[in-house]
Amino acid sequence: MPDNSTFAITHLVGTSDVGLDDAIKNGIRRASESLRNLDWFEVTDIRGAIGPMSEVRQFQVTLKLGFRYDS
Amino acid sequence: MPDNSTFAITHLVGTSDVGLDDAIKNGIRRASESLRNLDWFEVTDIRGAIGPMSEVRQFQVTLKLGFRYDS
Amino acid sequence: MPDNSTFAITHLVGTSDVGLDDAIKNGIRRASESLRNLDWFEVTDIRGAIGPMSEVRQFQVTLKLGFRYDS
Amino acid sequence: MPDNSTFAITHLVGTSDVGLDDAIKNGIRRASESLRNLDWFEVTDIRGAIGPMSEVRQFQVTLKLGFRYDS
Amino acid sequence: MPDNSTFAITHLVGTSDVGLDDAIKNGIRRASESLRNLDWFEVTDIRGAIGPMSEVRQFQVTLKLGFRYDS
Amino acid sequence: MPDNSTFAITHLVGTSDVGLDDAIKNGIRRASESLRNLDWFEVTDIRGAIGPMSEVRQFQVTLKLGFRYDS
Amino acid sequence: MPDNSTFAITHLVGTSDVGLDDAIKNGIRRASESLRNLDWFEVTDIRGAIGPMSEVRQFQVTLKLGFRYDS
Amino acid sequence: MPDNSTFAITHLVGTSDVGLDDAIKNGIRRASESLRNLDWFEVTDIRGAIGPMSEVRQFQVTLKLGFRYDS
Amino acid sequence: MPDNSTFAITHLVGTSDVGLDDAIKNGIRRASESLRNLDWFEVTDIRGAIGPMSEVRQFQVTLKLGFRYDS
Amino acid sequence: MPDNSTFAITHLVGTSDVGLDDAIKNGIRRASESLRNLDWFEVTDIRGAIGPMSEVRQFQVTLKLGFRYDS
Amino acid sequence: MPDNSTFAITHLVGTSDVGLDDAIKNGIRRASESLRNLDWFEVTDIRGAIGPMSEVRQFQVTLKLGFRYDS
Amino acid sequence: MPDNSTFAITHLVGTSDVGLDDAIKNGIRRASESLRNLDWFEVTDIRGAIGPMSEVRQFQVTLKLGFRYDS
């Protein structure tokens, strides 16, 4: 981070029916459509939904995303 | 949640002079004026203000609200 | 607790469309149908679902329930 | 809070056989008999006792109470 | 969750020598042999065992699993 | 743990009027009457009850117990 | 706890050069000299001091003590 | 807080090459360029970057900022 | 700490319009007017109030203070 | 663990541009170059860096590694 | 601690087949063979292994140990 | 961080009789005498010692320090 700059943090849940890595990437890709300058992420929760055949229907990864304020 | 969709999370403090249930409802109602597709909430803090007669002047409930990104 | 007795702990989510107190009571009532000697509870999470009119559709209270092992 | 004033914090458990809001109010009312200038509260634990009919016999809410030091 | 239904939570450790996604799936599959109506999961701990060649011998994922009480 | 096996976790409160070590042992002994293959424990809370002479009437140790699913 | 009664909580550090059980008892005994109606305790931290021979010079157990408000 | 009003919470990282107080002030000043009615803050993380001479190159303070919804 | 002595813990919020160090010192100075033998402190929360010009109107530092029981 | 043996714990951040499993393995492999007898790991944080195309440039997994003291 | 001195912290797991006090002492004794100036400890986790007769085969206490940097 | 590099983490307590910023700098400076490539820090605890005149005798800041493994 450049000195004295300020970073905003946004929170979201990325999901995937494939796995954790993919859920992280999906969440960041979706956020990048409306937010510029994404810089780092942190995973704060890992959850998921189970389907009728007891398969993992959806991995859900809660993310904090840091990005530079536009100047 | 539909597969691979992304959910944003917003944080706010709902308040009430009646009680906890009402503070939750007030916070969600106010958020719904500017956010569509609200889906779930989580309570992360319960606080309040005490008035001069030692009555509870205000219940304050910190909420995380999840909502679908518009597509 | 009687000295040297052992208490089991079970975890569940009680729900209600009315409020937090009711969600706690519903969860305990349901657990009491299969567990005897329920003794105490602790609330570990408060969450909920929001309906299409931005109303609280369901309060969800995660509970730890302590009960004496039958002897 | 006025600038540079100091606030003391006391901890207690308010109880009720009615519900959470009532347990908070009972705890604050009782504390106000010996403490002046109560200003805010925070709920740090929610627990309770279950009676022989599996009813909630007592809601127990652990509170932090902030109050101004007398000057 | 249907309104006013109750969900039980069970805790287990799913393991795998492949990776985290596989450990989650293995744990859920094994639980589904004795529990019906599995609905959601949450990861609360990620640990593992290291073998004599400093390879990851076993990924261990602690899970909370929610399921509907049979009615 | 053998590779890809699954471990269940149960929670209980072991008690003793002697001390912490004894409370842990009492809880595990009692659990072993109904659960086979107990493998490890973790202490998550230490509490107790105080008697009329301000003596420790009961040490209460909350335990997580891991055990292999029967196969 | 009797219904609707209020419990105060005090915090202290009990110490011992013998061990954890003794540190808990010492802390409660000392508190009982100034506080009546002690009812329960909870251990929130376990620390200690190490002496010049690398022996444990002092076990330090941080306690929350609950007691009934005099009425 | 006025009764029944709602407060939004935003998260950001304020930085400074001077120290913690300055990092807090920089973060709030920057946020105030786009948010009105800032009311309170909470520090949730303190981190920083170290430069090639082992000097603190940047203090980084993660903040929660509360502000009133415009009405 | 002398062996087997007992330490009480009190909680308070020290404030300052200057910065964190000053808020800590103000809280301890105020507590020392009524408590003797203050020995150590721990910071458990850092919060503050923001004024109408988006300046930090007040730094608020929650402290645990340990002190020897008078003997 | 053999009875009465002692285990040291070291902390590190393993990284990967592929995913979480790979970041865990990379961190353990690198640690094994200087530490013998690695026995278990625990993941305590999951973070990462985002690149200019909003792709995950680096997965960062903070690990606790346990290993037997050489005797 | 002398003013402006620096203390290092190391983490380890002390074990015992006797009990918690003994596990703490064993861990510190082992660490003192390679580290001088040990000053304080903190217990961060209490775990253990259960043997085939459901006896506690090993108490495992995770410790943080503080020691002065040699000068 | 360069891709796939590994970072070690060390823990220490920096101290100062001046304030928090100075305690952070003192701890990092001392660590840099024996560790190269220090990259980032995180504050995990803020404590201190109080002197006989109720002045802050020592600020104590627990730090996690990340540094690149030499290659």
Image: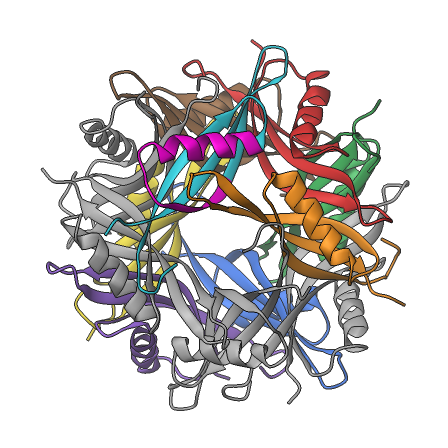
Chain colours: B orange, C red, D cyan, E green, F brown, J blue, K yellow, L purple
**Quarter in which the N terminus of chain D is drawn:** bottom left
- Where in the figure is residue K51, as x and y percent of width and height? 51, 31
- Does residue E18 appear anywhere in the picture? no
Q: Which quadrant of the figure has residue F6?
A: top right
Q: Is residue F48 above or below residue E52?
A: above
Residue D41 painted magenta = yes
* Residues rendered magenta in the picture: D21-44
- Where in the figure is residue K19, as x and y percent of width and height? 35, 34
- Where in the figure is residue B42, as x and y percent of width and height? 67, 48
Q: Which quadrant of the figure has residue K10?
A: bottom left
Q: Nearer the viewer, residue C30 or C26?
A: C26
Q: Is residue C32 left or right of residue F45?
A: right
Q: Which quadrant of the figure has residue C32?
A: top right
Q: Residue drawn at (30%, 34%), measured in percent from left and top? A: D34
Q: Is residue F24 above or below residue C3?
A: below
Q: Nearer the viewer, residue C49 or L37?
A: C49
- Does residue J59 appear anywhere in the picture? yes
Q: Residue drawn at (73%, 57%), measured in percent from left and top? A: B31
Question: Which residue lies most toward the front here?
Answer: B53
- Where in the figure is residue C46, as x and y percent of width and height? 65, 41
Q: Residue drawn at (81%, 36%), measured in percent from left and top? A: E32
Q: Nearer the viewer, residue F10 or D38?
A: D38
Q: Is residue D32 left or right of residue L51?
A: right
Q: Is residue C49 left or right of residue D64?
A: right
